[in-house]
Amino acid sequence: MSDLKSCPTVEPDEFVDKTLKNYPPKVAKKRRAHMLVRQESEENQNINANARSVPGIITQRGCCYAGCKGVVIGPYGDMVHITHGPIGCGFYSWLTRRNLFKPGEDGKNYSTYCFSTDMEEHDIIFGGEKKLKQAIYEAYETFKPNAISVHATCPIGLIGDDVQAVAREAEAELGVKVLAFNCEGYKGVSQSAGHHIANNKLFSEVVGTCDQPIEGYSVNILGEYNIGGDAWEIERILKKCGIRVGAPFSGDGKFEEMTSAHMASLNLVMCYRSINYLADMMETRFGIPWAKVNFIGVSAMSKSLRKIARFFEDPELTSKVEQVIQEEEERVYKELAPYKERLQGKTAMLFVGGSRAHHYQDLLKDLGLTPVAAGYEFAHRDDYEGSQIVSDIKLDADSRNIEELKVTPHPEKYRPRLSPEKQKQLEEEKVLKHYHGMIPDMPSGTLVIDDISHAELERLILDLRPDIVLSGIKDKYVIEKFGIPSKQIHNYDYSGPFSGYEGAINFAREIDMMIHNPAWKFMASPFEKKPLLTAELGVDK
Amino acid sequence: MLDHTTSEITPRKALRVNPAKTCQPIGAMYAALGINRCLPHSHGSQGCCSYHRSHLTRHYKEPVMASTSSFTEGASVFGGSPNLRQSLKTIFQTYDPDVVAVHPTCLSETIGDDIPTIVKKASEDGIVPRGKWVIHASPPSYAGSHVTGFSNMVKGMVDYFTNKGEKKVKGQINILPGYVEPPDMRKLKSMVAEMGLTPVGFPDTSDVLDTPKTGHYEMYPPGGTKGEKLLTTGASEYTMAMGHFSSKDPAAHLELKGGVPFTLSDTPIGVQATDRFYQGIMEATGAEIPKAQLDDRGRLVDMMTDYQHYLYGKKVALWGDPDQVISLAEFMSDMGMQPVCIITGTPGKIFEKRLKAILEGKALMPVIAQKQDLFYLHQVIKKQPVDLLVGNTYGKYIARAEDTPFVRFGFPILDRAGHSYFPSVGYKGGIHLLTSIVNTLLDRQDRDAPDERFELVL
Ligand code: SF4
Ligand code: SF4
């Protein structure tokens, strides 16, 4: 008998085999390495990740450009982001990610604009450097942004435009920062390569270029993108505790703030996948330590606040934090109670992103739901197994192509925040420099599937019939045709915030609505003879 | 909102700002979805495919299936042949489509992958199962726009399916609907069938991108033109092709290949374009326009005069895909509305020519521009304010910045409902379109009216 939570009639291993049967044998073998059945008794379960998707398999993944421009750099709303390439790439990444932005005092806000060199046949044949330079000039003349970024798309790499040289020239001539990213879509195997490329450039050309002190208990928030206003809710709570956000990377971010980010006391890492590089490099160069946090879920939020308090180790701050936690939790749990009652025991699957499929498990558990299967779209092994395994990961050809910067302590600006003893102690306590990964949090009998394909998702839904699936736009309506609600957790179905305490309430309300909406029951028309789902699935529900 | 857009128009040679078009493959993918049991395949890096699927999904709120060759750096240097072969292997075994419709992305196009040769070799090597089709379109993604991609994919259908010298089937006519919505494709077929003719409409995305929710998911919904049907396109007596930009090339190709003569008409939006649609078919086939359609026509004209107080003289700015925008501009000027600025991002001088011909002598000549963007349109209307904006969702920022009523029309519509259910073609479609125009203007009038002018009857 299986211990797979949702569905006692499904043997997890059998399920995996059945899923793989539909593939050509070589593909099946490859995919097998990306799946595991969780056994809590087994320590160090391995999974393959960050490997090429099989051509033709129907993956959820996007490209390097999407990771660089779309994810990390795009949210800086006071910059002009120029996509260098044919029109499509820039068009699709125009306002579709919901990284909300409020301009600063200077009123500069380009977040609703889309800029592209719109390369056409002639430009592809004769090269696009001139056009790019002209575009940068025109952008600067017309918009006077605080900085400009340039993002190369696939054909640009191929025709060999030197975007770095163009950016350097324009920067020197215009006197405005121009950051060029060689984030051509074919680099790496997913969005992930683009995160790394973006991190490298922010680190080497922006962070640490200005030394504006940041007063008080100061933190930077890394890997938080202000989807649906998440960053604002987090900021509200931190502010209430007396903690100051130096620079956000990059939700609601302003260019200027980044330049002094190294002056903060601590880096908080939300999405470890997209930004761990920057956290590591900043620690080496400036001595600023990092702590992994999760601001999604009530208990996760409180736990993260306590981590911060532990770092600063100031009784006044600690008691303030405890007071805020008590206040907020009391209110939130009261509001969540009726939802929890209705949601208790429901099952969920999560297939999305590089951190959310883990982060949201905390929130689901707060609401009484059980995750039965989960996986990331573009994560690496450490996101599954924990940051301690990083040194064991063998780099393949695709990853080797992404530059690893050699970082050394800054001769003047390196400033350790803690005594070596305390640093060591906090590392041992796993407060600093540690992310434990998704797998240890998954109960026995659940499935972990990396880079899930359409075929696998379909099989999972048919056999496991979860009550809800947390996923992305491309899967949402597939899942819902089956009669199972699907919550988008890339874009939150256009609502939010879902972070912090307020966010938990918003999320609970929506999950409850989606599962209990009376409209679902009309899928079965009264004129059909055959009962709808039961016959085909043989699942006792 | 859009505070950095000023009314002063400075020349731009290189920078596209707020585009009014997108790239070819999404149009190719959309067209391919209009073949029954077809899986569109994007030959390039996986990002494009992900973007195209996502955007179509946002527009339709429906599953949009497509696969990708998932190029990595190696494929970009050494060519994508192994990736396409692997894709076809995986696709046929795992997803069992009847047709795979391949389109290149900018990347594979720049590399110069020879898709037909790769596919031919794959067929010879048994990778493509018997009785299955692999077709392709050759859109250089960086020429034209999504409309061109659509047209190229439809041309690809003709290329692979239309046979030469077929014996003609009496009363069978090909319908090339152009780049329109699923309900439009459904409507056009029924308009032709009501005339007693047998339409072969392709592509046909109805019953693919507007499927019912029943609790069952089908990767290949029942809709889409069947391969067997497409094989008979050469046996049709005649082709009605709609939209210069989306249907002319495929129609001409069909004539060349299958010997089927065609009429090219504007997309039948509004009274006159729909009249021409019927006239074309009547002339070519001798069939009559049904009485019910004449009644619908009368109802549309009735509405155009019933609500004239709210329409006549109203200044409008329009943007979108050229075929629709041309007909829409004509429709509006037929009601005495006054287009002030009409743009499309899709390149093609014929856009300006056709519009000038249509609007000649009717009203003040508006600013008409192809290959333009929404930043430009916004600048124009800052100088010449309008009463109404009509275009795709991206206009909502302009509408807010200028506090102007806004009717969503075209592709994509990401923030309102209805476009995937109600047609805008034919007389009935005109009634639907006009309803949203009138109601939008009236909502604004009510919103802005002072209490003493806030009236019950309008
Ligand atoms: S590379 Fe070309 S095909 Fe791909 S999204 Fe960009 S413009 Fe479109
Ligand atoms: S062309 Fe390349 S960069 Fe653009 S969307 Fe496609 S994969 Fe991404």
Image: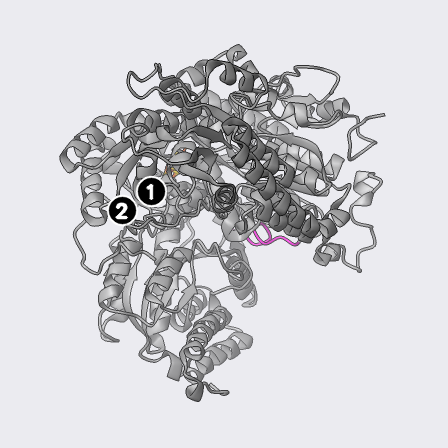
Is the CB atom of the residue marked by disc 1 within 8 angstroms of ligand 1's nearest atom? Answer: yes
Q: Is residue A291 left or right of residue A37?
A: left
Residue A337 screen position, x and y as percent? 73, 49
Near mark 1 (Cα within 10 A), the count class, few <14, some 14-19 or many ≥20, is many
The residue wearing badge 1 is A87
Number of numbered labels in the structure image:
2
- Residue A181 sits in quarter: top left
Classify residue A69 by image quadrant: top left
Left or right? Give the position of A479 relative to B8.
right
Per the rendering, the mark at residue B16 is 2
Q: Chain of mark 1?
A: A
Residue A176 left/right relative to A541:
left
Label 2–label 1 contact, CB within 8 A: yes
Q: Is residue B118 above or below residue A112?
A: above
Give the secondary structure at mark 2.
strand
Q: Measure the alpha-carbon separation of dots 2 and 1.
A: 8 Å
Q: Quadrant of ligand 2?
A: top left
User: Which residue is nearer to you in this view: A314 or B71?
Assistant: A314
Query: Dot 2, crowdedness within 10 Å: few (<14), some or many (≥20)?
Result: many
- Prevailing secondary structure of the magenta residues: loop
Q: Position of residue B240 (x, y in %)?
A: 43, 58
Q: Is residue A166 found inside the magenta-colored segment of the image?
A: no
Q: Which mark is residue B58?
A: none
